[in-house]
Image (tube, grey):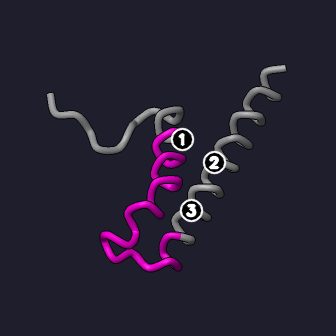
Amino acid sequence: MKEKYLPTSEAKKTLWIQNFGSKLPTYALKYGILPAAVEDVQLGATNYLYWMDYAFKQSEYSKN
């Protein structure tokens, strides 16, 4: 069975986006990615991680 490029579980997506956002600057020059695009991706990753954390905390709070 072919492995998917992007993870399907939320926990793995969180790790993937963290890793992608942190490593992108390393490859930006090599692949001609503009600094503004790198910053946009990093801000998007930070935003995603914030909302995933918020959703997790909201879910945990609802259980109590």
List the residue tagged with mark 3.
42
Q: Amino acid at mark 3?
A: Gln
Question: 45 or 55, which is in the foreground?
Answer: 45
Quadrant that contains the N terminus: top left
Task: Assign the magenta stretch its main secondary structure.
Answer: helix
Residue 18 in magenta? yes
Q: Residues within 10 Å of mark 2 (few under 14, many from 20)?
A: some
Residue 44 is situated, as x and y percent measured from the top left of the image, at: 58, 62
Around disc 1, counting alpha carbons within 10 Å, would you say few (fewer than 14), some (14 to 19), or many (20 or more)?
some
Which mark, by number, is residue 39?
Answer: none
Can you tell which mark lies on residue 14?
1
| Left/right of residue 27 with respect to residue 10 in the rendered view | left
Compare marks 3 and 2 and give the one earlier in the sequence: 3
Percent from the top left, x then y, of residue 24? 44, 60
Q: Nearer the viewer, mark 3 or mark 2?
A: 3
Residue in the image at 61% along x and 64% along y: 43
Query: Which of the 4 quarters of the picture holds residue 14?
Result: top right
Marks 2,1: beta carbons within 8 A: yes
Q: Quadrant of the C terminus?
A: top right
First of labels 2, 1 by sequence position: 1
Residue drawn at 16 percent across, 33 percent down: 2
Q: Which residues are magenta?
A: 15-38
Residue in the foreground of this view, choosing between 51 and 20: 20
Q: Which residue is mark 2?
A: 49
- Position of residue 15 relative to residue 28, above or below, is above
Asked which secondary structure carries label 3, the reply is helix
Q: Earlier in the sequence, mark 3 or mark 1?
A: 1
